[in-house]
Image (cartoon, rainbow, N blue to C red):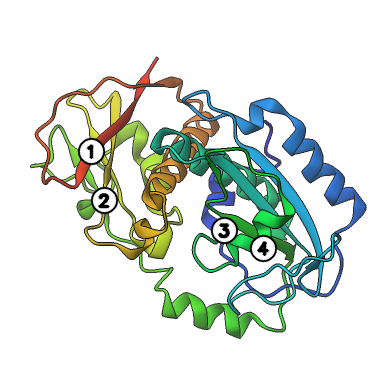
Amino acid sequence: MHFKESIIKTIEKRKSIRTYEDTPITKEDLDKINEYMSIEDNLIGPLGKKIKFHLIKVSKNVSEKGIKVGTYGFIKNPKAYIVGIVENKNEALIEFGYVFEKLILFLTELNIGTCWLGGTFTRNSFEKEINLSTGEIIPCITPIGYMTEKNRFFDKTIRRIVKADNKKPWDELFYYSSFEKKLKKGEGDKFDTPIEMVRLGPSASNKQPWRIVLSDKKDVCHFYLEQTPNYSGNKMGFNIQSIDIGIALCHFELSCNALKLKGNWRIKNPKIKLPNENTKYIMSWESK
């Protein structure tokens, strides 16, 4: 999929938008969104599993079917929602994070605002809109609409409350050779920018559970998920932090592609000593 501008700039500028203009989404933009969601390559993540999307247009939070859908007061004036559907399995949730974030970055390039929602929406009302198959869930949705300048104070206030802009430094997230040696910004060599794009990624409650260990030769990045102990977000019936690691994989791969750093994903556990029982290996990016 071709991005209009550098995906790195898009990752850097994208923020959660919770307040939208009254202007309906244009037919041209809706056509672009529907076309994107109809292309199979855009729906498949690194593990080869397919994610389903459903676009629900709303007026005052009532769908075209007449069903009231919405969120718990955090979203103002959305023009539609995009609902993601996936099997309730950890591998599928990783894929979901990858594919959904890729869609969100595409919407950002169309100047359409988005906001990852995992726990603050009326899940059962969206389930009435969509026929879920056995074993499927709606882990996350995003409202969509054009950004408004009028109510940006509300958005900024929410960002402060959830500490969305407080990203952990490199030496809390990234390592070299093992978990015993911290990696500092500027020491990632060719992977410096892709690793930084992982750091900037959104995550549930801004927990940032991704960890990367850069190999001795600096040609492989091993991705790990460090689960947050007793995190309430993982008590919704699915592991929301598996979605977060999918977002990290998406940012990393798209940034590598933009920089023409050839490589691919492999599940090949390097058997590095783990720092704690909450950390587990996910997959590795190997240079070609």
- Residue farthest to the right, as pictured: 27
Instruction: Kindly identify which numbered label has been placed on residue 128.
Output: none
Q: Percent from the top left, x then y, of residue 231? A: 29, 62
Disc ID at residue 125? 4
Write down the residue under mark 1.
Answer: 280
Task: Determine contact: label 4, label 1, CB under 8 Å.
Answer: no
Compared with 176, 203 (above or below) is: below
Q: Which is more toward the observer, 101 or 175?
A: 101
Residue drawn 69% across and 77% down?
Answer: 76
Q: Which mark is residue 13?
A: 3
Mark 4: which amino acid?
Ser
Q: Tell me if I can see residue 114 in this picture.
A: no
Residue annotated with mark 2: 227
Estimate how packed mark 1 is, as few (under 14), some (14 to 19) or many (20 or more) residues with alpha carbons within 10 Å: some
> Label 2 amino acid?
Gln
Q: Quadrant of the N terminus?
A: top right
